């Protein structure tokens, strides 16, 4: 297999043998791909692949482990500070929720937009919620945000609902609480309108609940990096 100049982003790198790297890519045409970048560590004039920078990648091999032959990086400032922590979270979700060589064209476009948004000066929480929504939808785990989970009827804007993993959103006897939301709020999440803080906060809790059963017992390593961000109300505000 020989592949030339495929659009990609680097999700993760780690040392391999004495001078090489293992590189986890997310590509438009091939989904997640693992490559060996030979001799890039410690070598002068080498340009190791960088996370959160768009690139064109070429490789050869039969897989599942391919050999990197070329990587052209686009000009970029990359991510720093809290935005870098958010980027690590997005990358880890992709690696845990998708399978190697499964193609996700739509999700690739959303990921590219998420990186661009995090590199800008817009709200980080909006970028994260949009990505989580797209990831859950692409994997088939996004709850139905339009219907009563008991009757199948459309949600009423002024009624309260709570999320049940096995059924979706069902009418709630409570009028407030951390797991109770108005139908109007759920509709805003469904159409991707995250301008209101209460909608972003509701989406964060709902998406985390929907993701949890599919992430396994091992906690997300990026959660530790996100704790200071979350304590500053950035993720939900």
Image: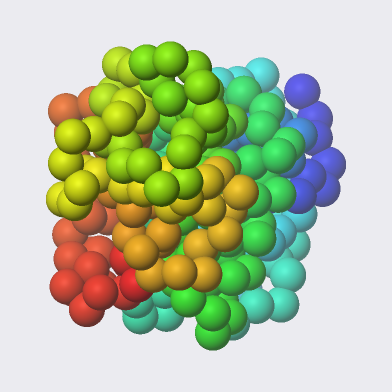
User: From what the image shows, is residue 148 above or below residue 110?
Assistant: above
From the viewer's side, name the closer residue of 154 and 225: 154
Picture quadrant of residue 68: top right
**Furthest residue toward right:** 4
Residue shown at the point (66%, 19%) measured from the top left: 62
- Residue 64 as seen in the image, left or right of residue 207: right
User: From what the image shows, is residue 164 above or below residue 211?
Assistant: above
- Residue 170 as seen in the image, left or right of residue 5: left
Where does the N terminus fall, quadrant-wise? top right
Residue 5 image offset from top left, x and y in percent: 82, 48
Picture quadrant of residue 122: bottom right
From the viewer's side, name the closer residue of 164 and 21: 164
Residue shown at the point (53%, 53%) measured from the top left: 188
Residue 159 image offset from top left, x and y in percent: 36, 42
From the viewer's side, name the closer residue of 38 and 90: 90
Where does the C terminus fall, quadrant-wise? bottom left
From the viewer's side, name the closer residue of 91 and 2: 91
- Residue 194 as seen in the image, left or right of residue 216: right
Residue shown at the point (70%, 66%) measured from the top left: 73
User: From what the image shows, is residue 219 above or below residue 122?
Assistant: above
Residue 67 image offset from top left, x and y in percent: 62, 36
Question: In this rendering, does residue 216 appear at all?
Answer: yes
Residue 167 image offset from top left, x and y in percent: 34, 17
Residue shown at the point (20%, 47%) measured from the top left: 175
Question: In this rendering, does residue 37 appear at all?
Answer: no
């Amino acid at each position: 297999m020989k592949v030339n100049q495929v659009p990609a982003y680097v999700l993760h790198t780690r040392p391999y043998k004495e001078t090489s790297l293992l590189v986890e890519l997310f590509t438009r045409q091939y989904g997640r791909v693992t490559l060996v970048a030979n001799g890039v560590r410690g070598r002068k004039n080498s340009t190791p692949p960088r996370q959160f920078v768009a690139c064109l990648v070429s490789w050869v091999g039969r897989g599942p482990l391919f050999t990197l032959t070329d990587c052209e990086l686009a000009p970029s400032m990359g991510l720093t500070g809290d935005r870098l922590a958010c980027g690590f979270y997005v990358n880890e979700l992709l690696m845990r929720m998708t399978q190697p060589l499964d193609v996700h064209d739509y999700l690739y476009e959303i990921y590219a937009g998420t990186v661009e948004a995090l590199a800008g000066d817009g709200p980080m929480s909006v970028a994260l919620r949009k990505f989580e929504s797209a990831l859950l939808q692409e994997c088939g785990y996004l709850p139905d945000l339009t219907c009563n989970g008991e009757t199948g009827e459309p949600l009423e804007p002024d009624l309260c609902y709570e999320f049940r993993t096995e059924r979706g959103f069902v009418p709630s006897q409570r009028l407030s609480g951390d797991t109770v939301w108005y139908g109007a709020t759920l509709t805003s999440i469904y159409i991707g309108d995250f301008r209101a803080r209460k909608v972003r906060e509701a989406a964060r809790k709902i998406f985390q609940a929907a993701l949890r059963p599919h992430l396994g017992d091992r906690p997300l390593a990026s959660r530790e990096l996100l704790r200071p961000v979350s304590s500053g109300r950035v993720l939900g505000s």
